[in-house]
Amino acid sequence: MCEFLIDHAKRLLAGRSVVEVGAGTGLPGLVSARLGPSSVVLTDLPSELELLEKNVEVNVAQGKEADVTVRACAWGELDEWQGEVFDTVLCSDVLYHQPRNILKALANTLEVLCSKRSGVVVFAYHFRENLIHDAQFFEFIDELFDERARFDFGDVWMFEWVPKRGEAC
């Protein structure tokens, strides 16, 4: 994902607000911070924030990148995020045979955080052995987003999704 973001920084990051969902170590978000966005928010479960905060402390030189913050975001638990949207939503390598309700919560989280007006979700999917199970997630995504682009890098697929422009807009 990081190479993809570097290659498409002007279109996907420059001057935009960015959030990384399920950031883990935060690498895509940290790389994005150096590519011209107005702000970057790295999110993960509350129990995982210590690592993210340390990585921000070690890797973000004050004044040289966008403002980078770390926040808790459990998929589907979005009360404190209502009304807060981002131009670019990053999500990389997060599908690990989760139950259907977690896959639905992830899809809903991406929808809530993605600006209906100018938003795009950039999603990296690392194909492993269970595409049939993961297909449920992509069915949820098809209900909420239109696919703008798809890139095939062998066992990694990159998607760009934009919100459906229905009555909610």
Image (cartoon, helix red, strand yellow):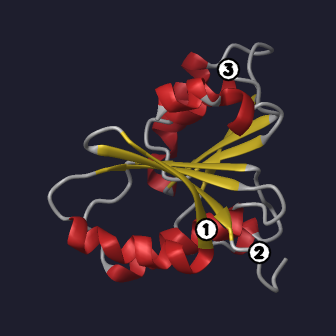
User: In terms of sequence position, does the residue under pointer 1 or pointer 2 come before the other?
Assistant: 1
Q: Please give the name of the residue rendered at 52% of the width and 36% of the height, measured from the top-left corner.
A: 52
Seen from the viewer's position, the closer of residues 10 and 98 is: 10
Give the Cα distance between marks 2 and 3. 31 Å
- Classify mark 1: residues with Cα within 10 Å, few (<14), some (14-19) or many (20+): some
Give the Cα distance between marks 1 and 2. 9 Å
Q: Which residue is denoted by mark 1 in the rendering?
A: 146
The image position of residue 1, as x and y in percent, is 46, 35
Give the Cα distance between marks 1 and 3. 28 Å
Q: Please give the name of the residue rendered at 67% of the width and 28% of the height, measured from the top-left corner.
A: 9
Amino acid at dot 3:
Arg
Return the mark for residue 34.
3
Look at the picture and state if 78 lies above or below 20: below
Residue 77 in view of the camera: no
Amino acid at dot 1:
Asp
The image position of residue 19, as x and y in percent, is 66, 47
Q: Quadrant of residue 95?
A: bottom left
Q: Is residue 143 left or right of residue 139?
A: right
User: In terms of sequence position, does the residue under pointer 1 or pointer 3 come before the other?
Assistant: 3
Q: Is residue 146 left or right of residue 102?
A: right
Return the mark for residue 165.
2
Amino acid at dot 2:
Arg
The furthest residue to the bottom: 167
- Classify mark 2: residues with Cα within 10 Å, few (<14), some (14-19) or many (20+): few
Q: Quadrant of residue 116?
A: bottom right
Seen from the viewer's position, the closer of residues 74 and 150 is: 150
User: In terms of sequence position, does the residue under pointer 2 or pointer 3 come before the other?
Assistant: 3
Camera-nearest label, 1 or 3: 1
- Classify mark 3: residues with Cα within 10 Å, few (<14), some (14-19) or many (20+): some
The image position of residue 34, as x and y in percent, is 67, 20
Seen from the viewer's position, the closer of residues 79 and 11 is: 11
